[in-house]
Each structure stands twice: as C-alpha cells, then as structure tokens.
Image (cartoon, rainbow, N blue to C red):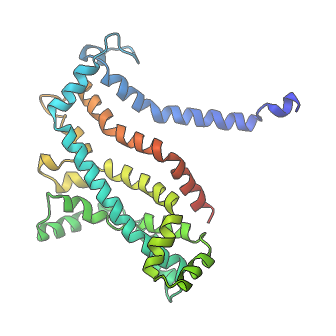
Amino acid sequence: MSIATRLPRPAAIARHLVLLVLAAVTLLPFVWMISTSLKPQAEVFLSEIRWWPEKLHVVENYTAAFAKAPLLRFLLNGAVVTAAIFVLQVAVALPAAYALAKLRFRGRQTVFALVLFCVLIPPQAIAVPLFLLFHQLGILDSYAALIVPFTISVFGIFLMRQFFLGVPDDLVDAARMDGISEVGIVWRVMLPTAIPAVTAFGIFSVVAHWNDYFWPLIVLNSEPLFTPPLGVAAFRNAEAGTDYGPLMAAATVIIAPLVVAFLFAQRRFIEGIAFTGLK
C-alpha cells in the first residue's frame, strides 16, 4: 500500500476537524462545571481562566452540596419518575407500533399520519389544560402528576414502528401458526428483536424527563417531591445563591447518572438508531 493511499483524504480530515470542534464546544460547559465544582470560592471569580484550581476544594463543595439540599432524595425522585415513564411508554408504544407496522386495517396510514402530527405539538401548548385537569382530579403535587402526561410517547411509537417494518413478516406468520396471539407476538417475538430500538428510545426518554424542568415546576410545591432539575434550582436562594462551588457540585452529581447510563448503553443505542434508520 502506498503512502498516498494510507493518508486520509482532505475531505475526511476536514470532517473530523469539524466534529472535533463541535465536540469541544458541546463539552466545554460540562468541563467548566466540573472545574468549578473543584474550586474554592475565592478562585471561582478570578478574572483569568483557570481550568485546574491551585487549591482543591472537592470534599468541601460536594459535602456542602449534600448538606444544603436533600440531594439523594432528588435523585431518587428522578429515578422513580423516569423509570415509571419509560416503562409505561414502552407498554404503550410497542403494541401501537406493532399494529401500525404489521397489521392490515382500514385507515392505518391515516392513523400513522395523526401520530406524526402529534410530534409537532409542543408540551407547553397543552400545559394549561393538563394543569386544570389534574387540579380537578386532585393529583397535583404528586408522582402521578409527573408521570401521567408522558405515558404516551408519539416519538416512541414512530421509532418502534420504523424498527418493526424491518422485521420479516415470515417471523410474525410463523408465530401465528404456532398459536401465539397478537398480544403474545408483541411481547414474546417483537420485543426481543427490538431491544436495540428500545434501548435507544430509553436513552432519549430518560434524558428528556430526568432534565425536565418546565412541567415539575408547574405541578410541584412540596420539596420532598422535587426532581433533580428543581433540586439544582433549590440552591438559588439568599443563603447559597452565590456559592457556586456546591451548586456546580450538585449539578455534577445530578448529571453523572446520565453519563454512566449512556456509557453502558451506547453500543445498543448506536445499533438502535442505525437499524431504525435503515428501515
């Protein structure tokens, strides 16, 4: 192999440079957040940019983060809410996607078009009607108020439907010949084949609802029910509003589970997105 063929092409070099720049811009705020969580208060407001502090303040900042707010309670609330939402979304999305992908019935394309149309509706547009409905039902300021509005994910239905289109019809027909019901096919045949798509959707769902600030701010009043984003907002008060070391330490602790979850699921996530895009 000649030297010329081993060298990357100019287009490939340019593409990688652009990706590196975009990655650096994306990661810069997170690096600064972690850097600030390691600094004493005196070094936070220096006029010069210092990525690594002269004096580490790790134990003090992270201890203060857990002392000034019930951070573990906020993390537990976030885990309960995001897990419940994801399980319910999968329970709804899989049968709906299977029906749209593998069943033949009149108006199927119209139903799918309506599903796509629902993707265009922003959550803020229906926030007030939902708030009034939950007020009438008496479920404001509860886990139910955080979970119920998101049990149906039109994006999840779309993603699963696209994945199911690539599953051979012969597999479904063989399951029917074995006497498996349509519901059984969804959970015993389609679900195992859709694990990469479910994992990819899980990353999107968990990140979106773990970081959701708008809806919990509207429906919650009790601090014991606060989700992680509201927990970070709890640091903005007269006592700790300018204490950015513990504030950034709390933000780092809250973001860490998402990073760890993605690192464990990244291979399945990439498979799910790639396989779904091919259908």
Q: Position of residue 170 (x, y in %)?
A: 62, 78
Q: Is residue 232 above or below residue 271?
A: above
Q: Position of residue 207 (x, y in %)?
A: 38, 49
* Nearest the eye: 11 or 257: 257
Instruction: Confirm whether residue 30 shows in the render.
Output: yes
Q: Residue furthest front?
A: 178
Q: Looking at the figure, which quarter contains the C terminus?
A: bottom right
Q: Looking at the figure, which quarter contains the N terminus?
A: top right
Q: Is residue 246 left or right of residue 68?
A: right
Q: Is residue 62 left or right of residue 166?
A: left
Residue at 25% across, 20% down: 59
Q: Position of residue 85 (x, y in %)?
A: 31, 60
Q: Is residue 261 above or below residue 59?
A: below
Q: Is residue 52 above or below residue 31?
A: above
Q: Residue furthest top?
A: 54
Q: Is residue 6 above or below residue 138?
A: above
Residue at 35% across, 59% down: 86
